[in-house]
Amino acid sequence: MSPEQKQIVRNTWQEVAPQGDMAAQLFYNRLFEIDPSSRPLFQDVDLRKQRTKLLQALSDAVQGLDAPDALVPVLEDLGRRHADYGVTDDHYDSVGAALLWALEQGLGPDWTPEAKEAWAEAYALISGVMRHAGH
């Protein structure tokens, strides 16, 4: 990711974070809509707590964009745990689509082509590390 893309991700996250729970609800609703196979992964999960975990993980990832040496081991651990939960490569694709959609809803007119590209790149990096560790 370019320094400009990292800055876009940080700036847009600051806009979304205050409405984080709403964005997380949108995310999970969209995920279950576009990928019904993901719903069983959450059957025994308190979705309120899961939304909090999602927001914390995204905050950590955004903050860690400039510190990959610290971020990569955290993402690798997360990827291994997600593999144990039954997360597949297809789920990562669905999560990416749902995440970008939820960000677009939360950012409205601030969801520019540059923001979409920066977030897509950030998600590709994050999910790439997680997918690799989960195999």
Image (tube, rainbow, N blue to C red):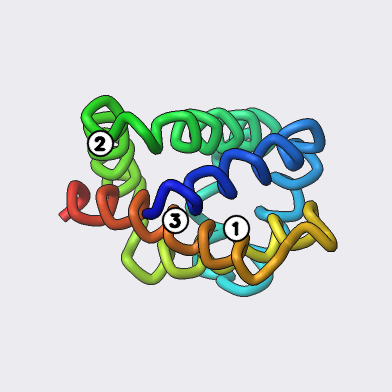
> x, y (%) of residue 66?
36, 34
* Marks 2/3: CA–CA distance: 13 Å
Q: Earlier in the sequence, mark 2 or mark 3?
A: 2
In the image: residue 93, left or right of residue 82: right
Q: Secondary structure at mark 2?
A: helix
Q: Could you say where residue 109 lies in the image, as x and y percent from the top left? A: 84, 62
Which part of the image, by quadrant, shows the C terminus?
bottom left
Residue in view at x 25 percent, y 49 percent = 129
Q: What label sits on residue 72 in the rendered view? A: 2
Residue closest to the far top: 70
**N-term-proximal mark, 1 vs 2:** 2
Q: Amino acid at mark 3?
A: Tyr
Residue under label 1, please give it.
99
Foreground disc of the pair 1, 3: 3
Q: Residue at x 54, y 43 (%)?
A: 7
Quick one: label 1, few (<14), some, or many (20+) residues within 10 Å?
A: many
Is residue 98 in view?
no
Q: Nearer the viewer, residue 114 or 52?
A: 114
Check disc 3 and report the residue beneath it: 123
In this rendering, would 58 be left or right of 75? Answer: right
Q: Is residue 40 above or below residue 72?
A: below
Q: Is residue 24 visible?
A: yes
